[in-house]
Image (tube, grey):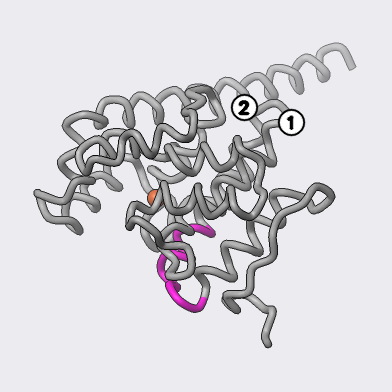
Amino acid sequence: MSMGPGSGVVAGYHDGIPLDRWARVTAGRLLADEQPRRWAHSQGVGRKAEGAALALAPADRPVLVAAAWLHDIGYAAAVRGVGFHQLDGARYLRRLGVPPRVCALVAHHSGADAVAALVGLGPRLAEFPDERGPVRDALWYCDLTTSPDGLPVSYRTRLLELRARRSPDDPVVRALADNGEERAAVVRRTEDLLLSVRFGHRAEVDGDRRTG
Ligand SMILES: [Fe+2]
């Protein structure tokens, strides 16, 4: 049996495997062959997270990167359960022994709560806590500024694309009335964080030049 990308063969997570690497390999096995476009998107989000992670505390970096690679595995046939991809993905990861924080980030990514409330899955999603901090914001940001083909786009473009792709009565579109502002705020907060870190680094470099 092939064990390469897209093979569908998934091994459980255990301590000792680098979490971010395991996540990349696992997402590829579930999505690469079955859903190439979704895989292209996941790669774009995973790569963007690898850059954004540098703005986070070192211990948080593999958590963000792992959640980014895995955020949409709930769409894979082997993972699908109730048909709500954030919840299906999170539960699947929990069964594989993935750290609870990564499962919870996947469960709540990119405004899942408002969609879950519309389809009656709010209590099930609440099995997982929503940590509401910069790591969670960065995950949403990476997803919300990456096109379905994995290219970097503005949040505004992503929103226009989403509305064009889905029907107005799709719960994801209807939920924008509840979570649109929060999604935009998350993107702004993360952009501010990334900018402050970038300028902070520059200030350090300038400082080194001055003193050196
Ligand atoms: Fe998603």
What residue is pinned by disc 2? Answer: 198
| Residue at figure coordinates x 51%, y 34% from the top left | 138
Q: How far apart are labels 1 and 2 at the CA level?
A: 19 Å
| Residue at figure coordinates x 63%, y 74% from the top left | 9
Q: Amino acid at mark 1?
A: Ala
Please provide percent x and percent y for residue 48. 55, 47
| Residue at figure coordinates x 33%, y 31% from the top left | 183
As rendered, which of 160 and 175 lies closer to the eye? Answer: 175
On the image, which quarter does residue 23 sit in?
A: bottom right
As rendered, which of 141 and 18 lies closer to the eye? Answer: 18
Please provide percent x and percent y for residue 90. 50, 47
On the image, which quarter does residue 54 sit in?
A: top right
Regarding mark 2 in the picture, which secondary structure is present there?
helix
Dominant SS type (magenta): helix
What is the residue that sits farthest to the left in this orientation? 168
What residue is pinned by disc 1? Answer: 59
Regarding mark 1 in the picture, which secondary structure is present there?
helix
Up/down of 51 relative to 162, above or below: above
Please provide percent x and percent y for residue 211. 86, 12
Side of 140 where 161 appears, left or right: left
Side of 103 where 58 appears, left or right: right
Q: Amino acid at mark 2?
A: Arg
Up/down of 11 relative to 108, above or below: below
Which label number is shown at residue 210?
Answer: none
Q: Which residues are magenta?
A: 33-43
Please provide percent x and percent y for residue 130. 47, 28
Magenta-drawn stretch contains 36: yes
